[in-house]
Amino acid sequence: MPFKNNRPNTPSKTGRKHFAVLLDPDNLTEASCLNLIALSETHPVDFFFVGGSLVTSQNQSDIIYLLKKHTNIPVILFPSSSQHIDAKADGILLLSLISGRNPDFLIGQHVISAPALKASQLQVYPTGYMLIDTGRQTTASYMSGTTPIPYDKPAIAACTAMAGELLGLQYIYMDGGSGALKPVSAEMIAAVREAVELPLIVGGGISSTEKAAAALEAGADVIVVGNHIEKNPGFLAEVSSLIASYNLTLDVHR
Ligand code: 1GP
């Protein structure tokens, strides 16, 4: 798997771009999941992230089962709490919500999860998770009881990411929230890219190839798309092609 904890093969070191499709169990049926799996056969996807800020259905386990049965693409948990750990997945983003000041999401849920994670075969990705205010309150910010970083304050985002890096976290995830009205700004992504060496994951509100390209140009190593692919599965193919063209350019200039 290219998305490893250890250097030198991290996305930020290689310059390669990666594409993660976020699957929210609440918004998927077996048929829609199988459709996305089929699309990913012809249009490569690097990761399936599974989860959401509030999962009300009981079908997360079924979705993971389907993914593991029908594809070799790594399945990475994107959990809202310790309740959503599933050892059938390949890995887990162990999110510490460093943009917030709620101890439960900085360390509390992690303490509860630690024994199950240690006992599992899951690859753990220690991730500094930063919620960014993109214009309306998101489920993630409401459910976590935290204030997101103001949209137009890239310095706060950069300092937060630096603190996460100094604390030993290995990834930074900047998230405008699912279905965000606008994505995280290129200016803020660039400021964080400049501030830390860590692989940078960016998601929330990426609803066009232009927005995806802007995030990549600004320094995102991994872009995450959920909502817009749920509404328009063909968008998976568009983003996949965009990522492929970036990586091709990289190979040509090597
Ligand atoms: C949300 O970053 C993800 O946590 C993806 O957001 O659903 O808006 O693509 P979208």
Image (cartoon, rainbow, N blue to C red):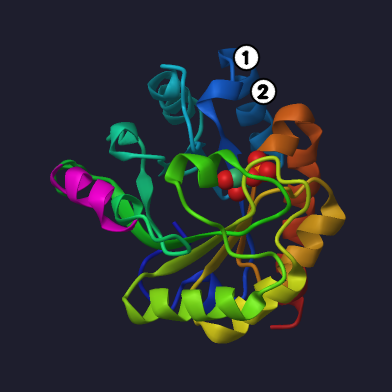
Q: Where is residue 25 in the image (x, y as percent from the top left)?
A: 51, 25
Q: Depth check: 88 or 1 in front?
A: 88
Asked whether disc 2 touches disc 1, contact meaning CB atoms under 8 Å apart, the reply is: yes
Q: Is residue 112 magenta?
A: yes
Q: Does the magenta stretch include residue 93?
A: no
Residue corresponding to mark 1: 31
Seen in the picture, residue 120 relative to 214 is either above or below; the reply is above
For the C terminus, the quadrant is: bottom right
Find the magenta span and give its range: 106-115
Q: Position of residue 124 (x, y in %)?
A: 31, 54
Q: Is mark 2 on a helix, strand or loop?
A: helix
Seen in the picture, residue 77 relative to 46 is either above or below; the reply is above
Q: What residue type is labelled 1?
A: Ala
Q: Residue 153 carries which label?
A: none
Residue 177 visible here = yes
Seen in the picture, residue 40 relative to 55 is either above or below; the reply is below
For the N terminus, the quadrant is: bottom left
Q: Residue at x 61, y 67 (%)?
A: 221
Q: Depth check: 205 or 74 in front?
A: 205
Q: Which residue is drawn at 76% across and 77% down?
A: 252
Q: Which residue is drawn at 27% across and 35% down?
A: 87
Residue corresponding to mark 2: 35
Q: What residue type is labelled 2?
A: Asn
Label 1 crowd bin: few (<14), some (14–19), many (20+), radius 10 Å: few
Q: Rounded to the nearest whole Å, what is the CA distance between mark 2 and mark 1?
A: 6 Å
241 horizontally vs 102: left or right? right
85 horizontally vs 8: left or right? left
